[in-house]
Amino acid sequence: MAWFFANDEITTEYYTVTGEDAAHIARSLRMKVGEALTLCTPDGRRHECEITEITRDGSRHDVRVRVLRSTMCEQEPDVKVSLFIALMKGDKIDDVVQKAVELGVYEITPFLSARCISRPDEKSLGKKRVRWQKIADNAASQSRRGVIPRVNPCISLRDIPDAVRDTDAAVVFYECGGRKLTEIIPKETRSVALITGAEGGFEQDEIDYLCHKGITVATLGKRILRAQTAPVAALCAVMLLTGNLE
């Protein structure tokens, strides 16, 4: 089943897919009138559709579909996990974004910390964010997500406490140890912020600052994980503890 996302809620029997998705349906997938596809909308609904018309105007394609059935999307986890990942060298964040979306992350926010080796300028960060969002879009479609997780603009570590203020639990993972996740995340938790560091981890004063702001320091075990492994491991653990990997 071809799986796509609509930008708006669908409230009528017919809907028109435009832009890159329409071109992908018509040119790459070579779908035909009468074939089925799924559209997911921002309200968390899944719409089973049938293609009724494919039109082309120069390089532009429009795909008109008829909605056959609409239900709530069951693929979304019942815990909203906000992932805060320190900037890393090269394309390491590409893989983190892809795997995190597949595992059910709600949103991803990159941040700058003292030990970040990668420090791109604002223009470069803008280009990276566009690429990361595209990776998130593709991963959401591949894994049959109900919504596309948002990749937020890069912030400073000092801005994190304000960003996590409304979550049930906010956790920073420190290579020098901390509490076990089983002590922090009960099954009924519905929103979590997970914070992981760059290749060199965190400075002690950064951990002290986050602790002072009410963020809990946690460990991912006795082994030292790579910067790109830690966020994926943490996300897996939270999904398991909240019953979203059952």
Image (tube, grey):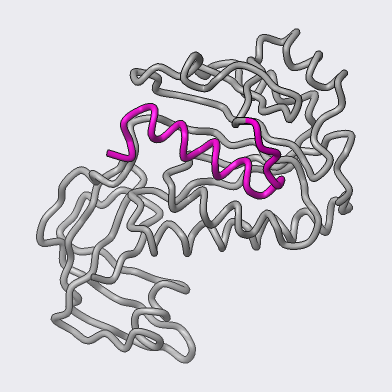
Residue 131: name its quadrant: bottom right
Quadrant location of the C terminus in the rendered image? top left
- Residue at position x 89%, y 48% from top? 117
- Going by the image, does 220 lie left or right of 227? left
Note whether 223 is above or below 216 in the view shown.
below
Residue sticking out furthest to the left: 68
The location of residue 192, given as percent across then percent down, is: 50, 25
Relative to 72, residue 37 above or below: below
Q: Which residue occupies the foreground of this view, 116 or 3?
A: 116
Q: Is residue 240 magenta?
A: yes
* Residue at the bottom extreme of this rendering: 58
- For this orientation, the residue located farthest to the front is 222
Count the marks: 0
Residue under the point 36% across and 27% down: 242
Residue 137 coordinates in the image, percent (x, y): 49, 59
Magenta-drawn segment = 222-246
Relative to residue 43, is residue 156 drawn left or right? right
Location of residue 240 (image quadrant):
top left
Residue 114 vs 172, above or below: the answer is below
**Residue 89 on the magenta span:** no
Residue at the image position 41 percent from the left and 79 percent from the top: 24
Q: Position of residue 35 (x, y in %)?
A: 17, 79
Q: Splitting the image into 4 quarters, where does residue 48 fall?
A: bottom left
- Which quadrant, please, contains the N terminus? bottom left
Looking at the image, which is closer to me, 212 or 140? 212
